[in-house]
Image: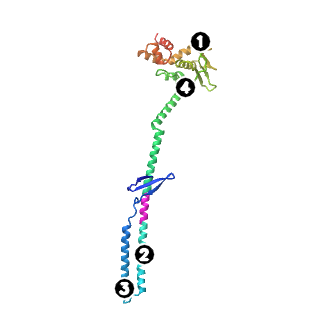
Amino acid sequence: MKEVTTTDHSPIVFAKNGGGIRQQPRCGGLHEPDVHWTSKFFIVVNVFLGWLLVGYMVSRHIGYGGDIKGADLVTILLTALAVMLAILTIFLASLAVWGYASIREASDRIAKDVASEVAKKTATEVRLVLQKRYSPNRVAKQAVMNMRTQLAERTDSYLTPVEVISAHQKTAPVDVHAIAHALGIEVAVDRLLPDDISGKIEAIGSSGKYRATVNGKHSETRQRFTIAHEIAHYVLHRSLIGDGIVDDAMYRSKQGSEIERQANSYAATILMPAPLVREMYRAGVKSYPKMAALFDVSPEVARIRMKELFR
């Protein structure tokens, strides 16, 4: 049960009734037509007029010089009563019309107030549910993220592989997984590869896409270099991949030492871009271990790359 107050401050009690609302006006809650004093006044006036009519008819009868007989008196009384009943009927009809209009006005007012209350409550509940499940900030952030992803994918499709790689070399360490994804290379981690196999790259059917598989038993640093190495094969030697290029632990394959040397050199370039390395070097990072930690590569890769750049 719940109580609300209408616009005219009359309390209304309403309760749930089969999913709806049932109005339950309190006693005195509605502005019922105040007819008690009017009824009393009308009764007095009606009786007075009736007796006045009786007296008038009796006096007229006597004025004509006739004697009032019992039948005449009954006729006079019945005539007066008929007149009183006619007046009473007119009064009650007027009262009924007025009362109906007043009650209907009050009912309309109550219905509007109850509907307004229910609408406010429903709107509040819906707003709370929406705020809880669909936070505007979260929705906006997700939309922005989706737009950025779509824009990046659309942009990458118009860039050359070298331009795609360059676009992901703004900060250290370089995200090789993002580069592979942007180039359409699927990266898989296989812990069942033999220890002497670092990874491989192969075409996926005739889809035009490639898969780079890395040894899951190797360290994260080594896996990063393997991914960069396979990306280098994709960029430099795509026409040679065929059914796949398998690289051993020394990053050697059947393609020959020169092919692997190129892939190793380009992998180091991907992981340690010259502008970033020089920037870090000017900032005071001059030791191999610190540079390796900064770019998430092995100290040996950092040593070779720094010697290339700072001879």
Name the amino acid, label 1.
Answer: Ser
Residue 100 belongs to magenta span: yes
> Which of the two discs, 3 and 1, labels the residue nearer the N terminus?
3
Q: Position of residue 221 (x, y in %)?
A: 52, 18
* Magenta region: 98-108
- For label 3, the residue is 60
Q: Are marks 4 and 3 in contact (CB under 8 Å)?
A: no
Q: Position of residue 249 (x, y in %)?
A: 58, 14
> Which of the two discs, 2 and 1, labels the residue nearer the N terminus?
2
- For label 4, the residue is 181
Task: Look at the magenta stretch and give its main secondary structure.
Answer: helix
Mark 2 crowd level (few <14, some 14–19, many ≥20, 10 Å Cα): some
- For label 2, the residue is 85
Residue 65 placement, left or right of 201: left
- For label 1, the residue is 257
Residue 54 showing in the rendered view: yes
Q: CA distance from mark 2 to mark 1?
A: 127 Å
Mark 4 crowd level (few <14, some 14–19, many ≥20, 10 Å Cα): few
